[in-house]
Image (cartoon, helix red, strand yellow):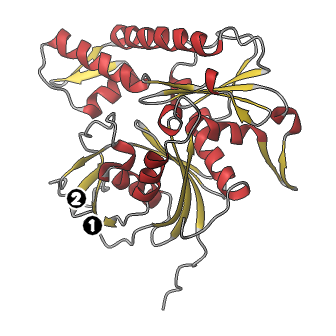
Amino acid sequence: MTDAPPINPIPVGLDDGYAFTKVALPDGRLIAIPSRARVGQSDVTWINGAEQRIFEYETEDAVYSVGAVDGAPTHFEGYPWSGLNRAVVQHALQQAGLTGRTVHAVSGLPVSTFYRNSGQHRQETITRKRDSLKQSVRPLSDGLPAGIAFHEVIPEALAAWYDYVIVEQDDGVTLDADRVSVPVAIVDIGGRTTDYVVVKDQGILHASSGSLQCGMLNVKLHVTDGIQERFDLETLSEQLVSQAVENKVVRLQGKNHDVADLVEAAKREVVERLHAETRRQLGLGVELDSVLFVGGGTVALAENIANWFPHQAVAEHPAFANARGMLKYLRYVCEVSDAA
């Protein structure tokens, strides 16, 4: 006889980005998987006990393969409430050991997707994202699904601000008065978007906040074009390009080819766009107490963005700043209701 799984819901910070999906758990674990999936079954059989690297999920009568597949593009407008997104999120929760558990989650949307220019919430979009992740997703295996019973949505870069000002210590949780009382800018370099949020006196300054449709996926697109042109190729798998960006080498027909120049050129082009938009949004940041860089792009472009402001800082494990902030928001700020 086995023990039944505990019924207490698990709070989760869920940064389901276009490039990576990150999960922050209350025990301090931080988990990231590529947002890599495609419609359809994997058509792969694992032989001789090989480790399974592709997993299949069903939602709304469609099957999705997640993991070591040639992933479909995620940089489309409806991704945050798509079946593709739900399958990737379910896989991330499975990887986090939440099989069969009830989950309470907070996720995010880019700033310009969450707010109108006036500062009003895009309520229809927010509701669509909130409801999507509460739909059932069934693993096509013996495992039980992780069920999201409560789901709230907040602006992504604002989540990193919550991570910055809410301080967890052994003796409890505090709101850092020094950090809350001064104007702070968050620059969140992600996969598809780069978000800007300026918070002053616990209010968002919308004139200096917003989103630029540019991020690390743009680097991959430029590298894809460069490799195809250099080697006269019609198509390239998404996994091959990801490895080329990471390792600056592409393996074709059994040989390694150095593509460091293509990767660096792609990064430079993206950095120039990001720098121009950062200056437009924040100027020289003279009235800001600090400029905090977060997001996976902050890690990948660390050398390129190191000296943009004299008072800038990089968050600890910057790729997980949003996920950590979402978890803190869930645990200490928002009111949880299973009906929400």
The crowding category of the residue bearing disc 2, from other C-alpha atoms within 10 Å (few below 14, some 14 to 19, many at least 20), is many
Residue at (45% x, 67% y) in the render: 146
**Residue 154: % across, % down:** 57, 45
Please, what secondary structure does the residue beneath circle 2 have? Answer: strand
Judge left or right: residue 3 versus residue 324: left
Residue 42: percent from the left, percent from the top?
A: 19, 53
| Residue 43 against residue 121 in the figure, above or below | below
Is 226 rendered above or below residue 190? Answer: above
Q: Is residue 69 above or below residue 310?
A: below
Q: Which mark is residue 63?
A: 2
Say what amino acid the circle numbered 2 marks. Val
Q: Residues within 10 Å of mark 1 (few under 14, many from 20)?
A: some
Q: How far apart are labels 2 and 1 at the CA level?
A: 9 Å
232 in relation to 31, above or below: above
Residue that label 1 marks: 140
* Label 1: which secondary element: loop
Residue occupying the point 46% across, 58% down: 93
- Circles 2 and 1, Cβ within 8 Å, touching? The answer is yes
Q: Earlier in the sequence, mark 2 or mark 1?
A: 2
Residue 53 in view, yes or no: no
The quarter of the displayed image where residue 252 is located: top left
Q: Which numbered marker is on residue 318?
A: none
Left or right of residue 259, residue 2 in this image = right
Q: Residue at x 36, y 71 (%)?
A: 143
Amino acid type, mark 1? Leu
Q: Position of residue 238 (x, y in %)?
A: 26, 32
